Amino acid sequence: MCRVSTFLPATAIFSVITTYNDFLIALTLTSTPDAQTVPVGVSTLIGKIQIEWGPMAAAGVIGALAVGLYLVELIGPALGWSSWVLDLSPYHHLSLVPTTSPAWAAVGIMLGIGVAVLVGTCAAALSSTATPQRTR
């Protein structure tokens, strides 16, 4: 029988790594404050001398509120909630189920580009780590 005590630390480690990677990618790709994600924007509130706890808490509440309203949109109809509760969510414009089939030609092209980039990166990494010949 599986024990939860073995799976819980592994899940926690993977969650922390994934969250940290998401933060680093957003930090690297956003160059202006208008394009920053919530975690990157909140991290700017930590200074060398002080931490602005009030704005950080407000950003956390706003971020949690956005996630909560999205969950209302997703699970509200399944739970039979009344229409006034469902109208609280600003996510009515999102389609829950794709209504059209994907453009398979575009999917194939993007997959081919991804494989080519992967193969090129691996080849470049292997050629740069090759042991050089000693000259006498």
Image (tube, rainbow, N blue to C red):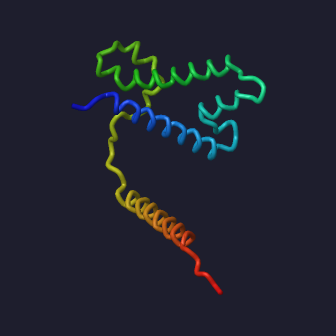
Q: Position of residue 95 (x, y in %)?
A: 38, 35
Extreme residue toward the left, this view: 1
- Judged left or right of residue 87, residue 131 is right
Asked which quadrant contains residue 93, the reply is: top left
Please say if 94 is above or below 117.
above
Q: Position of residue 103 (x, y in %)?
A: 36, 55
Residue under the point 44% across and 38% down: 14
Q: Quarter holding the N terminus?
A: top left
Judging depth in this view, the residue of 123 and 100 nearest the camera is 123
Residue under the point 70% across and 28% down: 46
Extreme residue toward the front, this view: 136
Q: Quarter holding the C terminus?
A: bottom right
Tally of numbered tags:
0
Residue under the point 41% across and 64% down: 112
Please say if 31 is above or below 9.
below
- Judged left or right of residue 4, residue 130 is right
Please say if 17 is above or below 57.
below
Judging depth in this view, the residue of 12 and 134 nearest the camera is 134
Q: Position of residue 5 (x, y in %)?
A: 34, 28
Please say if 92 is above or below 84.
below
Extreme residue toward the bottom, this view: 136
Asked which quadrant contains residue 63, the reply is: top right
Residue under the point 63% across and 35% down: 40
Q: Position of residue 29 (x, y in %)?
A: 62, 46
- Judged left or right of residue 94, residue 78 is left
Judging depth in this view, the residue of 42 and 33 nearest the camera is 42
